[in-house]
Image: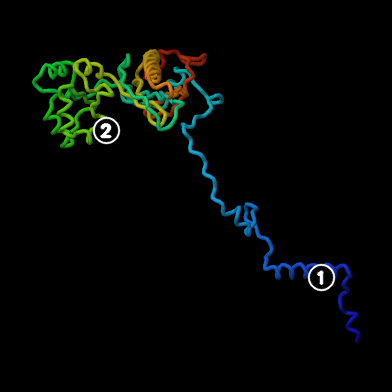
Amino acid sequence: MNTSLLAPRVSRQHWRTSIQLNAHLLALRNANLQPSRRHASGKSIGDKRERDQPKKKKKARTDFKQYDLKNAEQFSLCDAMRYIQAFEVGRPPTSPKYDLAVRLRTIKNGPTVRNRLRLPHAVNTSLRICVICPPDSKHAEAAKRAGASVVGEETVFDAIKEGRILFDRCICHLESAGKMNKAGIGRILGPRGLMPSAKFGTVVENVGASVKGLVGGSEYRERNGVLRMAIGQLGFTPEEIQTNIKAFMSEVKKDIGLLSDRISKEIHEVVLSSTNAPGFTLNGDFKSAKSPPTRDLSVM
């Protein structure tokens, strides 16, 4: 039998292609190369120069990131209060507080805004104030008459060192500043933001007037480009909240104006929230066409 008749016929073109492929593989082997493999990124595995280059680090932001408010939903004061009160249903009017957050366009690691303010309508009237001054002096009597709850020198220092800090604010008379520094209470009061300092106006000559300014007053301080302050109790009327907001914003603008001309700070966003409610960006209007009557927002 002729076996050549059973063998498959192979065209000349097939043989030519097979010979070319074998020649190509032989050339690769002789050159000690392998067929190119690639990463998922598309870069060749053999191309180490480009692949092994250290990645360029992104430049760190020098200012806080702010979002564009053009397309953000904004609310009038009365509308924001209406939605907030819906989250606070069933809670006593004096327990939850309205909070105002003022977001600033400012650089990081720059000077911050910090101050205290007595609002036209006091939010917290149960503030405990400590006055460091000679206990038997006229300054101590003036502090007690103004509403200070803790007055003295050595007794106050000993109580602080023992961990009995029974006050929310601390004022020091000028005559007692040396004794206070020697007592070493700064490491205890400093982290709590209670250490008296001439820079922040808590080392004073007239302690009586300072105590009167603190009773019913509130402090605010910039953190991460945001100023926060309790602006009213939940039972306040919209007019009372509006008056407090105006007083707070006016004081913030003054504080910004007192900073160096080289430091740029601008108000970017004002947000009203409460103890248990989310924040609502204010558009600067008192009420809108759809706002309920203000008397309805005054009754809880």
In-image side of 70 versus 267 (left or right):
right
The mark found on residue 19 in the picture is 1
How many marks on residues?
Answer: 2
Q: Measured from the top left, where is residue 172 in percent x and y? A: 19, 24
Mark 1 neighbour density, 10 Å: few (under 14) some (14–19) many (20 or more): few
At numbered mark 1, what does the secondary structure look like: helix, strand or loop?
helix
Any part of residue 83 in sight: no
What residue lies at 22% left-to-right and 26% top-to-bottom?
A: 170
Position of the N terminus, as image quadrant, is: bottom right
Nearer the camera: disc 2 or disc 1? 1
Which residue of the protein is positioned furthest toward the left in this rendering?
136
Which residue occupies the foreground of this view, 62 or 98? 62
Query: Which quadrant holds residue 195?
Result: top left
- Residue 267 location (% of width, % of height): 45, 22
Disc 2/disc 1 C-alpha distance (Å): 85 Å
Q: Position of residue 206 (x, y in %)?
A: 19, 16
Along the line of sight, the residue nearer the viewer: 155 or 235: 155
Could you say where residue 61 lies in the image, as x and y percent from the top left? Answer: 48, 35
The numbered dot on residue 192 is 2
- State the SS at label 2: loop
Mark 2 is surrounded, within 10 Å at the Cα level, by few (under 14), some (14 to 19) or many (20 or more) other residues, namely few
- Where is residue 7, by image quadrant? bottom right
Quarter of the image with the C terminus is: top left
Q: In this orientation, which residue lies closer to the viewer: 142 or 124?
A: 142
Is 297 drawn above or below residue 168 in the view shown? above
Q: Amino acid at mark 1?
A: Ile
**Residue 190 visible, this orientation:** yes
Looking at the rendering, which quadrant does residue 159 occupy?
top left
